[in-house]
Amino acid sequence: MAVAQLYYYVAPQSEIQIVAKSLLRLLRHHREIQTIILKSIVFIADKHKQIFEPYLKSFYVHSNDSSLVKRYKLEILTTLANASNISTILREFQTYVLSSDKDFAAHTIHAIGRCASTISDVTEACLNGLVALMSKKDETIVAESVVVIKKLLQINPSQYNEIIKHIVRMVDKVTVPIARASILWLIGEYSDRISKLAPDVLRKMAKSFVDEETIVKHQILNLAAKLYVVNAKQTHLLVQYVFNLAKYDTNYDTRDKARLLRALLIQTDKCPTLSKHAKKILLASKPAPILESIIRDHDQYTLGTLSFVIGQKAVGYKDLPDFPLEPPDPSVRNVEIVTPLPSQNVSSRKSSTTTRITSREKKKSVNDENFYSDEEEEEEEEEEEEEEEETSTEGPDTDNEEEEDEEDEKEKTTQNDNDTNEYEQLDAQSTNNIEPEEEEKDESSGSSEEEESEQEEEEEDDDEESESDESADDEKLTPNQSSIVAKPSSTLTVSDYTIPATEKSLLEMDLEAFLGAPSTSTNVQVAPVKNNIFDDLHGLESLTSTSSNLVYTKQYDCLNRITGQGLQIQYRFPRTPFQQSSNMVHVELIFTNTTTNKDIHSIKFYKSKSNINIQGFNQIDLLPSGVSIVTSIGIDFNDKTQPASFDILYDNNLIPTSLTILCHVGELIEQKFLNDQQFNQNLARLRGMNEIMDSVNVDEVQISKLNFNTIQTKILQCANMISVPSTSGDSTLFRFSGQTISSKSLVLLTIQLNMTQSKVHLTINSDQIVLATMLLKEIKQTFQSIL
Amino acid sequence: MIHSLFIINEAGDAFMEKHWKTVVSKSICDYFYEAQKKCVNPEDIPPVIATPHHYLINIYRNNLYFVAVLTNEIAPLFVIEFLHRIMDLFENYFGECTEKSVKDNYVIVYELLDEILDSGLPLITETNILKELIKPPNLLRKVAHFVTGDSTNTTLPSKQLSNIPWRPFDVSYRNNEAFFDIVEEIDAIIDQNGTIVMSEIQGYIDCCIKLSGMPDLTLNFVNPRLLDDISFHPCVRLRKWESEHVLSFIPPDGNFRLISYHIATQNTICMPIYVKHHIQYREGSSGRFELTVGPKQTMGKSLENVIIECTMPKSVLNCTLTPSQGKSTFDPIKKILIWNIGTIETKTQNSAHLPTIRGNIILVTGQPIPESNPILNISFQINQLAISGIRVQRVDMNGEIYKPYKGVKYITTVKKGRFQIRT
């Protein structure tokens, strides 16, 4: 209804059509709703007839409609009547007239009258019909038809002498006062045509004058006066008699009227000027009355409101304002943009523009050189992608690889730089393709530049996929950034990501907010819709880290092809969170059929042998010869390095083949991002028993080579940890954080370089002290072996 | 904003009142009684009554009047719809909405009213959520309440947290079933000569879905073009319907009305029934009355529950009628003749076997002969046939792995008094 209301007031002519259907559908509801809807339709139909015309039949009256509904329907039918459909409507009306509900029949007659008056073609037919109705026995119908006929006759009196005569003859039969009054009025008005009958009627009326209703008495007086003017000789005495009767009437109005007429007609001496014109006054041609609808004058209220229904102003009713003559200021439609706040990180902009180009060039050359990790990794990944495309196995790493691919492409395009101090350390995790030589030239600023651009690329990818509301983050946008940076959105999110000082919760919220969209779009096949956000958060972490995952490429054998009769199984750790369960280590199994001519059928997970919880893989129906398939399993190592063993069945062998997966301590840890503050807080908590320290001796040349990137590379080789952004600016202190996958207990690693003594101090703080000891041992080995 | 609500029974007794904002004196109902007195028929009471300070909006259903008291301008349809919603809710809770059921469950009624309307503004009207908040009455709870004396709800409702407001999260059934009832109501007026003056079809699909988890159903029609004027349950994806003419939705749990549609007058429909009538009044206070009912184009389905109702003119004193099938009764006070025919088989095509009713009408002596013949209201039901010809092609389910049992039922019926034959 509200929609209909809007359409009624606002829509152009052409579109209002659609309102009709829905309003009609509402008519099928409860009686009360019907009533109000019909009332509104009456109102609308009055203005826009055409929209309801096709649905005329819906307004046909059922015998058990409530009386209000009937009346409204009648009203609508009358309103909708036009020359083309009048015949059907009239036929319908004829049946209504016969209805046992007399009140309704009377209304119908009234409606017929209105139709007749509006559509001249049918006036005659209507009149004939009404005259026929007058011969009915029921009084109300007769009376109503007389009244209506009277009105109709008034419109066009000249042609219907016969009808007038007929009506006049009925005056004795009709008892309903209003009908009698109408007849008398008719006689008075057209007494010239029925000059013989009229005085006789007056005579009869004079006889019964005392018993008549007031309205009839008035008409008798009128009639008498008119006759007196026309035909004074015959009626003189009669008129005087009537006036005398009226003089002693109980009704004030009647007496008054009699006095007036007497003065006008008989006592001419009292007001001579008036009496001269008596004839003109009394027999003036009167304008034909307009047959009004029964439901009117609600026009001033807004359609569909309470006031509209009750026809009076309700408390709190407000009129619709008129359309403004001037168009409103278009600026109000613009969404207000929050004024950008100066960001807390001041950019070292001077160097950036100059170094950008050089670093980019360098980058190319770097890539050309056979730098160990990058090329290898890419090759590997490409392979994997192919594999996965073939098998269409849904691994959680597909998106990461895609990301990387995109990145690689992006690297050739010009980049935007945005450098902040905090940023450098955070970004530095993705540094595997940075050469030491580069740093020698550019120092840290140059390298960080490089990384930042990379980081941005990553973020850009995210952003391009997401159309998330960056505008919400506008406040972080520094003015000078926006002037130079072509894609402000990327910088936005990056800066968002790196707010160091704010609380963790806020950060996480932000992360979720802007990562929600991108990772869902990339993870679409992988991630189930449930607990999406949680995964997304991890998805991001893995996303940012995978580019630096060296260990990812390490594959371990668990079933060699001889014992497996051609089936070779390798496993590796993709370092992404396992989708089904967050406290399982994600392990990818690579099944390879090494045979030349034999297909391996139905490889399936049988059961876990040790009491380690393992989430198995879906059955592989067919492994053709020479093909590899990658599947994912999740293993809950429970933060122990105990190997997990389980059985698989393949090729319809009844004897299960057992496999063992050995987990390195570093794989039991997942990245957990902490900011400086949080790191210190947790560090303070994990003192004493939970802290172990060791130091490694390195020679001077090597220690000079140790910078953030190299250290991070090393750490990532043995454990999946993330660096903590530092605010102190101490170039000899490096910190990493992570948490164990099963129990989610924090593992904090601090590396302190001692330049003077050529020592590297390693400190690990963790609840899981056994794990920490093993981790420390492994990190120590890495430092020793490579340096 | 709704200030108060009165529930008034047929006898004019306001047996329940509820005030949300300020207490409005019961005497406000006097205005309502006044309006009631003016009307012979309870249906004729205007739905909106204006009094000097308040506005009364009333609905009449099940012999009960619900009268809402307002003081301010508010869309009356909104209030009416809300009152009907309350009634639906009561029916849902107590099985029926009568004076007795309301009186028996005063506590729940007040609880419900408190929940659905806050400070005069409707709050929660979704039955699913309400049922979680306020448990419907059952015997066990009554006993428990009686023994422990504690009726407070200890568990926190969870359903409000569902991201699909009409469906709770944790639904599970052992038997997964989905039933669709396609019900069509014929709305018609047939005149003396048997020509159809007006005919419409009002159809709806009522579903009873008992599926676990979050199923995503799609409903395909054989001939979706038939439906042009539809109102959907909020769960239906409108875009899918517009583009593919497929109903795709995550159903609410339990019973609900999926769509309701309206097939307008333009397309003529074939009537499944015809009535031959012969009613005559003669001078001397008597008349003949004869009716024959026969099936027509029912596609082999039989007509069930055929009832013909006829309100005789006031001058009829009594009728002595003998039906060839079924039972007929005449109420001499209300002047209503009811002929309950029962089932009409289509196989008995022989017109001799068609149900007929014959007899005499006795008129009150001295009264004039009625001018018009009475109107016949017919109601019937045809199972396994949708008169518009709409058919469901298939029902698919995504999102869950189990195989549900799916059933579609077609019913053609007539809403009371909407199928009229003028004689």
Image (spheres, rainbow, N blue to C red):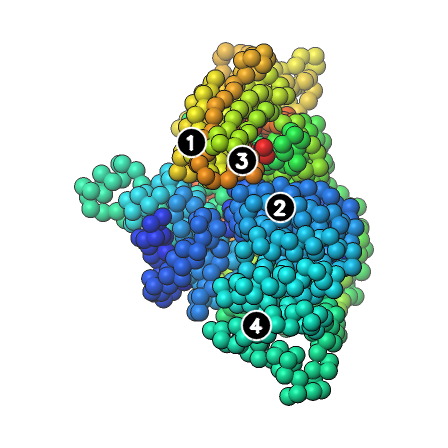
**Rounded to the nearest whole Å, what is the CA distance between mark 2 and mark 4?**
33 Å
Find residue A380 and name its label: none
Label 4 resides on the chain identified as A
Q: Residues within 10 Å of mark 3 (few under 14, many from 20)?
A: some
**Please, is residue B103 above or below residue A164 in the view?**
above
On the image, which quarter does residue A423 sit in? bottom right
> Is the same chain shared between marks 1 and 2?
no
Q: Earlier in the sequence, mark 1 or mark 3?
A: 1
- Subunit of label 1: B
Q: Is residue A212 left or right of residue A134?
A: left
Q: Residue at x 33, y 62 (%)?
A: B26
The residue to which callout 3 is attached is: B374
Marks 1/2 in contact by CB < 8 Å: the verdict is no
- Vertical order, B25 against A361 (above or below): below
Disc 1 versus disc 2: distance between alpha carbons?
28 Å
Categorize mark 4 by other alpha carbons within 10 Å: few (<14), some (14-19), many (20+): some
Q: Measure the alpha-carbon separation of dots 4 and 1.
A: 53 Å
Residue A17 in the image, given as x and y percentages of width and height? 72, 51
Question: Amino acid under label 4?
Answer: Tyr
Check disc 1 and report the residue beneath it: B318
Amino acid carrying label 1: it is Asn
